[in-house]
Image: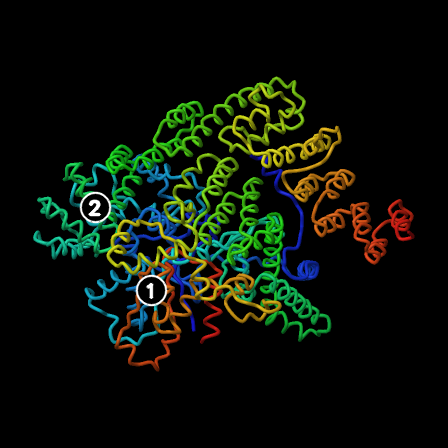
Amino acid sequence: ADIVNADKMSGRSRKYKIIFSPQKVNVTCDEWSFYLLPLDEDIISMELPEFFRDYFLEGDHRWINSVARALQLLNSLYGPFGKAYGIGRCAKMSYELWRDLEEESEGDGQGRKPEIGNVFLMDRDTDYVTALCSQVVYEGLVDDTFRIKCGSVDFGPDVTSSDKGIKVLLNAQDKVFSQIRNEHFSSVFGFLSQKSRNLQAQYDRRRGMDIKQMKNFVSQELKGLKQEHRLLSLHIGACESIMKKKTKQDFQEMIKTEHALLEGFDIRESTSFIEEHIDRQVSPIESLRLMCLLSITENGLIPKDYRSLKTQYLQSYGPEHLLTFHNLKRIGLLTEQSAGETLTAVESKVSKLVTDRAAGKITDAFNSLARKSNFRAISKKLGLIPRVDGEYDLKMPRDMAYVFSGAYVPLSCKIIEQVLERRGWLGLEEVVRLLNGNEFSVSDSAVEDNPAWESQRVILAVFLGGCTFSEIAALRFLGKERG
Amino acid sequence: RADEEEYWHSSKFRAFTFDDEDDELSQLKESKRAVNSLRDIVDDDDDDDLERVSWSGEPVGSISWSIKETASSSTTSLEGRDSSLQKGSSSYAAFPKQASSYSLSSLFKGRSKLPSFQSLSDALSDIGVKNYAPELRRPKAEYKDYSSDWSPRDSVRRMQRGKVCSLERFRSLQDKLVLLDEAVAGHDGNVITAVLIFLKRTLRREILFRELEVRQVALCHLIHFLKETGEQKLLLDLLRFLDRTEEVALSQYREHLNIQDVEKRREFLKGCIGLPFSAEDTSHIQDHYTLLERQIIIEANDRHLETVGQSEIFRKYPRKASILNMPLVTTLFYSCFYHYTEAEGTFSSPTNLKKTFKIPDKQYVLTALAARAKLRAWDDVDALFTTKNWLGYTKKKAPIGFHRVVEILQRNNAPVQVLQEYVRLVEDVETRLNLATKYKCHDVVIETYRDLKDRIQLTAYKCKVERGSAEEEKINSILNN
């Protein structure tokens, strides 16, 4: 099955990722109704860089209409969706608005044979953790290192080994790229070296050729070989750049720290690592990213750490980041534990809130954007940290955790997997509660009655707020696995 | 900062894979060699293969190209835009913006928000949004079903569909509130904002504020809108009304980013100190002010020193950038680099900075080390880690791990004798061995194996040292005991 994702997000950390600007661009204007940009065989982007900040930080719903219209467009092009699932306030609102639009319109998608079986809408804040982790699949690393914009990337002279850079389109058309993009970085070298040896062998064949064979070779094969040669050398150059950058930044230790945070041990050590990272002024975005990861997995930093890390951050990267910290606090990415908020205390508080429906409604309205993260509990329930005996095979991975070297299955992808498998949220109630609710599952009875349709295999996954290449890789894996 | 960056960038190649390090890295190198050797064979002169940037023929491609053209040609019109709009966007938190500098939506922001109103109400005149595409005329069809009698709900729907709709008929407060609630229920942020603009114009401020206080979603929209359009005064009034004093403070503080002149900025920061921040933040703001104040003094002084040309350090290492507005740690590095030996009394001395800003030892040592190592002042480095205990004996210790020290020294190409000293001090044995082997600190390797009583490794290490060298002798004498 093909999985179509809308919205792309640049590495967090860059963000800042986060807020660190995702990338998207949208225009709602009469003549420019230009909502969807196909980036690849299985990716469509809405290109809305402001989406994340506008919705999650400022609480502005201005893009919801765009999302609804995009859904409407897809619906009219590809026929009615069989079933719609979703989780998150924005997902819910987008879905509702879309249904409204459908009702009003003349419904020119009626009677059309459906090509997309299911659609899944997910708010980015359902799973911040995945977006905060360092990427180790090739495409993710290329994005982290060079920035992939609208499906293309700028490779500088150091990559091209010539004196000028080049802008390259990265998609399934690039034969080399398409084979390594979803692979874990460690598998990439082997592949590239194999390819280069093959290429060399191909060229070597020239030696034994006569005129006729040579002519044939030149007219038929040479172009393809040259193409491959060019692509290979680009990607090898890219790999070198990536390696250079990562070794400079103590990548291995950072990954170790991230894994520790995901699994929930060695927290003090991880905090020290982060502190040192800040002291050494390694990178403002990376430092923030790590702090946010710590905060989310631990339900907030302990006040002492929060104060001290904040002070050190301001000292290392500039006092104006006082503002950054406030924004991050508002959005719930980097918070401080208030008194009596150890992990267990929060869990009991959350479950209490949810059983009291009335209270839930009020707090929902005034909750603005901050949410409690219950990552550890969710992780346990969904089994996000795989138990492995022996080495985790990255070349022939057995589950989606390979996108993070076997340490962690992306939460967002796991949710999608589970909901699709169960055809709904049955059995996932606990998880939904821990995710702060707002889930839905609606089916179009007309379509449901015809399960034989091929379309059932095609799923549209929409990430409201962006998604990472790691998630895309994981979903592709899921798609291959489940058909 | 340029010093800093230059400093922190090393050319160290350490394989980062999780498996067999050397194997994979050499695999990569081998592929590279293979590919490069083919270069001569491959004809490089048909560059037409290099043309890549089309969108594989899809119509979308032409749109994106024409958008690019529009973007570049509209720069001037963007500049000419109401300055308040520009100010609004630049007064956001100083987080480095990575998105391409032309976010299309900002290009179209002028018109995208309120497509239905431009030809109608004067609501827009207060924010000065101009219509940027006069050539795009609204199709006549949109006016066809225009009637003056839509209910709030229908009005909202029309607006959501991008159709023309006047809100003027909603005169009573009641009607206006119903309209607003309908807009919120409709989930379309642009519509919500549009209604708010109307309300802002037609309601008394106190009433509007009061009503918004109990309508969170609408409130968020208004605040965001005010931020974007730079209506600072109204924004602050609103925040004060809501008793969100901290946000008032932050919003005002944020303005400092718009002040380019250093003196003015300093003055402004001074004024910020009294704002209603939390206690902690107040001290951060205070530090910000003090830091800038210091930097101004140091900058003036050093610039003078540079021009006069008498100071050796400034001659040898001319400054690449000014220290103004740099973070504290960078300033400390600078100070350790150019003013290391100064007494605590001067504003530019490192110890003064340490004291004034209460810089923790760890940070201080790390930064001083970086600076002195860059200058290859190994004695200074030594002094940083040496403490005399009461008996007069010297001992080396560090608030940061010695492996870090080694790393920094190595990055600055410290000679092996110096490096060795510190490798020896690395506590963790495995790390010590790794580093020692990597940087060829033979003595340390030998000593460590000796302490571990590892004959096998020691013997094996013999092949790594030079024949007939002192190290070889050392190994032999140990093995023979």
Q: Where is the N terminus of chain B found, in terms of image quarters?
A: top right
Which element is circle 2 on? loop
Image check: A136 left or right of B258? right
B269, A143: nearer the viewer:
B269
Asked which quadrant contains residue A117, the reply is: bottom left
Asked which quadrant contains residue B79, the reply is: top left
The structure residue drawn at horizontal position 57% and vertical position 35%, both measured from the top left corner, is B2
Disc 1 to disc 2, C-alpha distance: 28 Å
A225, A238: nearer the viewer:
A238
Residue located beneath label 2 in the image = B214
The chain letter under disc 2 is B
Which element is circle 1 on? strand
Q: How is the image coloured?
A: rainbow
The structure residue drawn at horizontal position 53% and vertical position 61%, both measured from the top left corner, is A404
The chain letter under disc 1 is A
Locate residue A34, reporting x and y percent: 32, 57
Locate residue B167, reporting x and y percent: 13, 47
The structure residue drawn at horizontal position 18% and vertical position 45%, both measured from the top left corner, is B119
Locate residue A155, reporting x and y percent: 55, 52
The answer to whether one can see residue A443 in this image is yes
Image check: A57 left or right of A387? left
Identified by mark 1, the residue type is Gly
Task: Report crowding for label 2: few under 14, some 14 to 19, many 20 or more residues within 10 A (C-alpha).
Answer: few
Q: Are marks 1 and 2 on the same chain?
A: no
Residue located beneath label 1 in the image = A86
Identified by mark 2, the residue type is Val
